[in-house]
Structure formats: C-alpha cells, structure tokens
Amino acid sequence: MTIRIASMVAVSVACVCVAPFIGESLDGDEARFILVSLRIPRVVLAILVGGTLGLVGACYQTVLANPLATPSTVGTTGGATLGALIAIMSGASSPVSGVPLTTLAAFAGALFVTMIITSIASTGRARTADILLAGIAISLALAAASTGFQFFSDNRDLAAGVRWSLGDLSQIDYDELFILLPFLVPTALILLYQTRALEALVTGEQRAHSQGVDVGYVRSLTLGIGALGVGACVALCGPIAFVGLIVPHLVRLSMGASRRILLPMSFVFGAAFLALCDAVARVSAPHSELPVGVVTAAIGAPALTWLVVRSSRAVN
Amino acid sequence: MTDALELSSVTVRAGSSVLLDEVSLRLDRGQFIALVGPNGAGKSLLIRTALGLLRPVSGEVTLAGRPVRALSGRQRAARLAWLPQEALPEDPLRSVEVVTAARFRFDEPLAESRRAAGVALAAVKAEKLSERLVSTLSGGERQRVALAATLTQEAPLLLLDEPANHLDPVQQMAMYQLIGSLWQEGHGVLCVTHDVNLLGHLAAGDALEQCQVVGLAAGKIRFRTSLRAAELPDRLSQLFGVRFIELRADEHSYFVVRKAPRLQ
C-alpha cells in the first residue's frame, strides 16, 4: 500500500511538473513570458481547483453516503452557474473592488443553495438519501432557470454564458490566484481535519453516532466548507465537470476506501488530473483551445467505467 | 457516582402510534439483561432511544446520572457502545481500518488507535482477519470484526442487537461464549435476541441465575425474570402467543415451541 501511495504521488507530481511545458515549443523572446505569466499560473490554478474539487467530492460522497454525491448533484455548482449567468446576461460587468461581478454572483449562488441544503442536513435526523434528493431537485430547478435566462438573452451574451458554463482555466493571472487562496487553503485544512469523523461515518451514520461522532455537525460543516471552496473555484473557472465525481472513485477503487488515504490522495490526484487535462485542452485544437470540461469528461468517463467494470469482475 | 444506563417511564411515539410505552429499565456494570420479544416489539428502538438517536415524548434516559442527549458524543461513547444489527458496509475497507475508526472518542495518535484495534481483534479471535477486506469475510467473521469495533470503544456498558443473527449454530455458540466472557469481565450487557436457548452458552449453570430476561411486546415490558426461573416457559408463551415447553438434557433447560395441533 505504501508503495502504491508513493508511486501515485510521484506520478502526480511528475504530471504537474511536465504540464507547463506541454504545448507549442518555448523558443525565442516570448518563451519566458508565456511560461511564467501564462502557463505557470494556469497550472497552479489547475492544482488548486482540481485538488479542491477532488477532496470536496470525496467528502461529499462520505457525508451523504452515496457514490453519486458531488458538488454538482447537491446544487452547489448549479447555484454558482445561475448566479454567474444572471451577472453575464444582465450585462453588469463593472468589478466591485477589483473582483468581477460574475465571480461574486457565482459565489453568492453557491453559498445560497448550500445554505438550504445544509439547513436540511444539520438536523442530523434527515436521511442522507433525502438530502441528496433535495439537492438534485434544486439542481434541476436551477438548470431550468439557467436555460430560461439563456433563451431570453441576445446572441453575444448567450455565447459568453455558454463559454463560461463549459469551464475555463485560461483567463488567470497571479492576482486572481491570490484571491482564491484564502478560500481554498482553509477549505482543504478543515476538511482534512475531519478525517477521523468521516472515517467513522463510512461504517454507517448511526454507528458513527454511537462511537461519539456528532453527525449533524460534521455533515453541515462538510457541506458548508465544501461549498465555500467549490463556490470560489466555480466563480473563477466556471463549472468543471466530472473531477469531483471521478477522482474520488479512481482513488477508492485503486487504493481502498479508508478516508485517511482517500481524502489526501483525492486532492493530490485531482490536482494532477486537472493539470494534465488542461494541458491536453491547450494543445488539442489547432489555433484554439478545447474547454477543459470537455477534456475531463472525455478522459475521466472511460477511465472510471473501465475501473468499475474491472473491480466488479474481481469481486464476483 | 454510577455508570448505569437508566430508562425511566420512557415513551416514544411516531405519529399516533406508540412505539415504546412507559418503559423503565436499568443496566449497570456486571449485569446481563436479555431483551426478548417478537418482531416489531420495539427492541431495537429501545436501544436506539438509549443511544439518544430518538427523543422520547415523555420519560427520561440517563447515563451516569445525566440525560443522555445532554452528553457530548464522546462522553456518551466512553460509557456506552453498540453492536448494531446492520451489516458493515461493502466499501473496500480492511477489518483493522473499521475497528480503528471506532476509536473516534479517544484523542490519540493513529498508531495508538491501530494498536488498540489489534488488541480488540485478538480479543474476538479475529487477529488473522486484520488485513482482509470486510467485504470478503463470511457472516461470522464479519460479525466478530463488528464486535471488535464495539469493544475497542472501551465502554463499560454494551448494547448488542441480535449479535448471532445469520450465524450458523457453531458460530452462534462461539459468539455467546465470547459475550459471556465480556459479562464475566464486568461489562454490563443488554442483549437483544429471539432465542433464549443461546443464553445458555454465556456461562456455567449457576452463573446463569444472574442472567435477567426481560420480555417486550408492542412497546411494553411484559415480564422480568431470571433465565433459570421456573416461570420462564409460561412467560415466553404469553409473550409470543405460542406454547413454549421446557425440555431438559444434561441438567440444562431448553425452551422449544410445541407443535400446534392441526386444524381440521
């Protein structure tokens, strides 16, 4: 197991180190500018966002006791998307003290939806399936509202909205990275600090209660803090599909379900996965770029399917 | 100061139906209480109420003299541990990881939790299963690992819900012998079961005098008696609504259901 963890960390670090050098060859005067001002912040962003999405996905799957639970299925992403679309469509783009209005609106949307879900979850008596169903219902309603906004918007706003909703890591500079840090660092630390409680929750909520875990508190803290991190990510990069779903499953199926391994490794692997996907997105379309969400889905979905089929064969 | 778990006139309701009706019960260190009764009598519900998972509409559940719902999770877990009926999950978890997770109440480094988990697994003779995935274990092995998780909490009072469910006769006997030794070590045990005959495996004949049998039906306590009391077969007959008879072999009593006369 130690060897597996070590090799996975090594591969992840290698991916991240190679990522900035993927793309058109770096020659000439502009090389330094491209590398330092364009590609490195982009890779750092991918590490932060991918790691956060992977970690939050693993935590959500644990507290909601469901392999399909992700920030997307409980409405966090949907709330952020609707918020951002409203800001884009209404044409209000003047920044508030340096932060673009789109970002603020997305963040507010994510937090608003999570407050609803967290208030359902915090009683400790709501069943996890009910919380997830409520989240899915809210997500669908938000998606319908987003579609409605797009229907009534003009072509230019529509294009901007669609472009945003596909996820994009390319528009980033160092200032924006520094905006992200105060959200993502506490998110990761607080979630990792919950490892013991989350490990106990894996064996069942009522069992965890009897072992001394305050289930309602752990649930609402995890959902709330997770939304803070994911809200910040979505606000800056748009919704990036699949990372929060696929990464924890890849780690679980290859290294076991113990949260002591699953949580940190979901961060590490999520970071490497998104950095690599973004590099692929950068070079896959000539004179242009693919949205990174397309690449994460194209690589992640077959990989997950293959792993699930393989592991179900091993058990039977 | 006492460690006892005490239910005083506890009533639990769901809507208009009464699930527990004025139930009073006291469990202290060194006591063994077998809770028997038909399906749906409220046995598991009584345990979940004792753990503070359900809120009674009237009456009080206290643990070590304080209302159980006023205790912090860790304070409660230090005094009261539970072996639920629900099976362990199918997630790819190793036995030692499941048992280690149950050490949540201790503020200690991971290595210490691992060591204690190893001790608990050895206590239930499951040390060889330590590195195995729980999903690959047999029913009997899985139940032993679950019991190790309960024990590693190091609580003086144990609530065991059908500990021999789904086990073959040999495993059932081994499980009850193990529970008997926990009782002899001084644990207070509340054990839910359908089968009073399994209680005979707990200890040698005379010690069974101290084993209390409490009958629960439709949320009400119907009787309290000793496992060795002469009235037990009649009490069981009333409780389950079928005729129990006592058979004796090797100076030990066995209670079986008499075949009903065939209706013409």
Image (cartoon, rainbow, N blue to C red):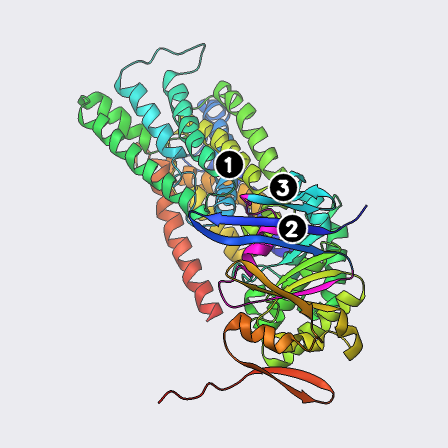
User: Where is B168 relative to A165, above or below?
Assistant: below
Q: Position of residue B37 (x, y in %)?
A: 55, 67
For label 1, the residue is A122
Q: Residue at x 46, y 85 (%)?
A: B260
Which image quarter: residue A155? top left
Disc number placed over residue B69 in the picture, else none: 3
Q: Which residue is mark 2?
A: B7
Q: Is residue B118 above or below residue A285?
A: below
* Residue A9, percent from left and from top: 59, 47
Nearest to N terminus: mark 3 or mark 2:
2
Q: CA distance from mark 3 to mark 2?
A: 13 Å
Residue at 46% over, 31% down: A26
Disc 2: CA contacts within 10 A as few (<14), some (14-19) or many (>=20): many
Identify the magenta region: B30-57
Q: Is residue B32 magenta?
A: yes
Q: Is residue B133 magenta?
A: no
Left/right placement of residue A192 relative to residue B182 reads left
| Residue B211 - label | none
Depth check, front residue: B205 or B90 = B205
Q: Is residue B171 visible?
A: yes
| Residue A284 in sight | no
**SS state under label 2:** strand
Determine the CA span between mark 1 and mark 3: 16 Å
Instruction: Indicate the amino acid at tag 3.
Output: Arg
